[in-house]
Image (cartoon, rainbow, N blue to C red):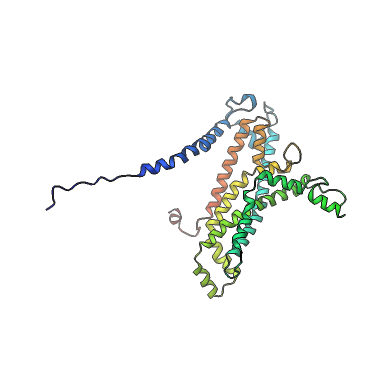
Amino acid sequence: MAGGGTKSHKLVSYAKYGYMFILPFFLVYGFFMIWPFINTVLLSFKGNGSKVNEWVGFQNYSWLLFGDKSGGRFATGKVHHDAFFDGFGTTVILWAGNFIIQIVLSLLLAVWFSDVRIKIKGTGFFKVVMYLPNIIMAASVAAMFLMIFSNTKYGVINSLAINNGWIKDPIPFMSNKWMVRVIVMFIQAWLWFGNTMLLLLSGIFGIDPSIYEAAAIDGSSGSSTFFRITMPILKPIFLYVVVTSLIGGLQMFDIPYLMHTGNDPNDYLNTVATYIYKHFHKFNNFGFSAAASILLFIVTVLLGMIVMRFNTDATAPKKQRKK
């Protein structure tokens, strides 16, 4: 018989303390990210210059995507339309060029450092050295490469070549379309390959060593092990690297903007981000630059979703993939 003196125990919930700890993050994120994004969306439907408070609807988007052939108050819309798409093309070229170099080099180094058969000494030192460019300020990097590849005879490469009699006139590195683009591709790959290598290396170290042991017992070669074991298991990390690199690449600004020898950025390095910055601060086209920012955001989201689709197994049933 149960005693009448039993006491009911009240459960104490500590969930509220967890919400209190994460509240500062959401406040900061909402203030510095969500509200500026909402404000940018609203600004994209407004005018430019002195008419920034005038509501123009989808006019800015229409000028960006199709140009302004009516000769209205923003008569240079057609020129800006062409420049916007040229900026997209330049952005894709610079991102693709540096990403190919970056991912190939990072994969090779990650596999090399993780191969127990090679047993490289001092891998920790090499990892730190390769990651160091990632923490250098972009302004310092741009200034260094401008000094190295200067168009004048006082540039490091031109001075060395002229003094040794290899050339007579300085090479215009910064004025040549593809030379300056290749330089920026190299800079971006040099800055980020260490970070990418560490991400891939962490994914490789997460693979069960017994899988490699079984493959070695079965007589699998190094290349076969890489393509049949390492890469399939590394797929989620690899796709993460692609998506983050894609997001950063489409927003590429600092290096292309700083790589110029005059007052204005190099025309061959006008990315979408530099185009938006220039129209916002130099021409006061606030609505126009806001619309360009939203279009860039939409393209980034769509491309990210396309890439992430590769993370699903196409041979699995649809319900299973959804689950």
Q: Residue at x 82, y 45 (%)?
A: 152
- Residue 232 in percent (x, y) is at 54, 62
Q: Nearer the viewer, residue 10 or 48?
A: 10
Asked whether the viewer can see residue 89, the reply is: no
Is residue 142 left or right of 161 when viewed as pictured? left
Is residue 97 left or right of 172 when viewed as pictured? left
Location of residue 87 by image quarter: top right
**Where's the C terminus, which quadrant?**
bottom left
Q: Residue at x 78, y 44 (%)?
A: 175
Asked whether the viewer can see residue 277, the reply is: yes
In the displayed structure, would residue 2 be above or below residue 214? Answer: above
- Residue 163 in percent (x, y) is at 86, 52
- Residue 244 in percent (x, y) is at 57, 49
In the displayed structure, would residue 285 be above or below residue 203? Answer: above
Location of residue 12 by image quarter: top left
Q: Residue at x 53, y 75 (%)?
A: 217
Location of residue 137 by image quarter: top right
Is residue 92 left or right of 200 when viewed as pictured? right
Q: Nearer the viewer, residue 147 or 303?
A: 147
Q: Nearer the viewer, residue 280 or 57?
A: 280
Q: Residue at x 66, y 50 (%)?
A: 188
Q: Residue furthest left?
A: 1
Q: Nearer the viewer, residue 73 or 214?
A: 214
Please state the total of marks drawn on the protein image.
0
- Residue 124 in percent (x, y) is at 59, 60
